[in-house]
Image: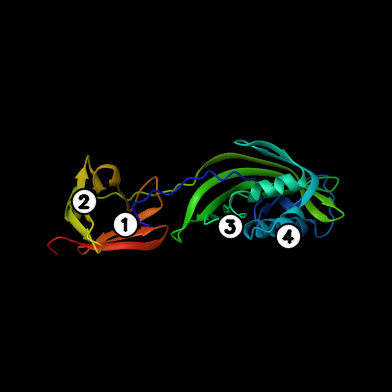
């Protein structure tokens, strides 16, 4: 698949819990039962649930849900019962086999876990979902917030209520590095990729623009000859008369400046 094809948005809509949440002070809130191992138990249950999710393991997911679990989603509404909630998270990506293999990852630094009274725990944070598409590249898709109520049951810690909300596209966070017009000017010209594709690089309104028309990219300088774009996980490396194009961190195309 060409690097020019836009990242496919599929708006994965699932709730979830962080893999390694930060604990409240001393691991619990005032009045919470200090049962030894409770914190580790919740974290282990979270690991089991999301390992099962990433492996399309329906039984493994169901084992970490209460029979009367309720799942509230800002895009798809409410769902309930263990079987329906677990099945809804796998529909369209696991059965029948799909080339859109979804993987969930916690967003570092956002997770919190608080033990409550009467054998409950509250987990919250953000997580992202990535897709391995037919071209073999794992692509950032969506990011969302979640809150989940865990319950200590005879079968171990299980989720009984889940909220999934603030779903949005997972876009790169770029930190622009100031560049002089002279530095930009030294990079401009016509580049030809190894497959023969011609890409003009020009300066428009003080910014570098690669390509033309619908395939034009406004580049953000990230330093040391690296450039990104705001709405794609694409990066470009320019220098010494060469261009390299990276899609989700993988080198997908390269070429040279005409005349060099």
**Residue that numbered label 3 is attached to:** 97
**Residue that numbered label 1 is attached to:** 236
Front in this rendered view, residue 47 or 59: 59
Q: Alpha-carbon neighbours of circle 4 within 10 Å: few (<14), some, or many (≥20)?
A: some
Residue displayed at 84% across by 48% down? 119
Q: Is residue 36 shown left or right of residue 210?
A: right
**Residue 150 image point, x, y percent:** 76, 48
Q: Secondary structure at mark 4?
A: helix
**Residue 211 image point, x, y percent:** 24, 49
Name the N-terminal-most of marks 4 and 2: 4
**Which quarter of the image is occupied by the C terminus?**
bottom left
Q: Is residue 200 shown left or right of residue 90?
A: left
| Circle number at residue 44 | 4
Name the N-terminal-most of marks 2 and 3: 3
* Measured Cα–Cα span from mark 4 to mark 2: 51 Å
* Measured Cα–Cα span from mark 1 to mark 2: 12 Å
* Measured Cα–Cα span from mark 3 to mark 4: 28 Å
| Circle number at residue 193 | none
Residue displayed at 39% across by 48% down? 6
**Residue that numbered label 2 is attached to:** 201
* Measured Cα–Cα span from mark 2 to mark 3: 42 Å
- Residue 105 falls in which quadrant of the image? bottom right
**Residue 115 image point, x, y percent:** 77, 49
């Amino acid at each position: 698949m060409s690097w020019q094809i836009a990242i496919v948005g599929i708006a994965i809509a699932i709730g979830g819990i962080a893999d390694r949440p930060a604990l409240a002070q001393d691991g619990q809130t005032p009045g919470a039962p200090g049962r030894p191992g409770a914190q580790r138990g919740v974290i282990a249950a979270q690991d089991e649930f999301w390992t099962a999710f990433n492996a399309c393991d329906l039984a493994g997911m169901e084992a970490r849900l209460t029979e009367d679990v309720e799942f509230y989603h800002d895009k798809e509404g409410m769902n309930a019962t263990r079987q329906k909630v677990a099945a809804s998270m796998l529909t369209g990506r696991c059965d029948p086999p799909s080339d859109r293999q979804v993987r969930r990852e916690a967003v570092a630094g956002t997770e919190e876990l608080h033990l409550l009274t009467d054998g409950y725990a509250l987990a919250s944070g953000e997580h992202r979902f990535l897709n391995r598409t037919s071209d073999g590249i794992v692509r950032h898709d969506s990011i969302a917030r979640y809150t989940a109520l865990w319950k200590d049951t005879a079968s171990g810690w299980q989720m009984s209520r889940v909220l999934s909300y603030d779903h949005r596209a997972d876009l790169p966070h770029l930190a622009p590095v100031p560049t002089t017009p002279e530095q930009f000017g030294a990079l401009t010209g016509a580049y030809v990729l190894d497959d023969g594709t011609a890409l003009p690089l020009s300066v428009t309104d003080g910014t570098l623009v690669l390509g033309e028309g619908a395939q034009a990219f406004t580049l953000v300088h990230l330093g040391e000859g690296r450039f990104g774009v705001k709405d794609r996980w694409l990066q470009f490396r320019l220098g010494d008369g060469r261009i390299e194009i990276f899609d989700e961190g993988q080198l997908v195309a390269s070429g040279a400046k005409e005349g060099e």
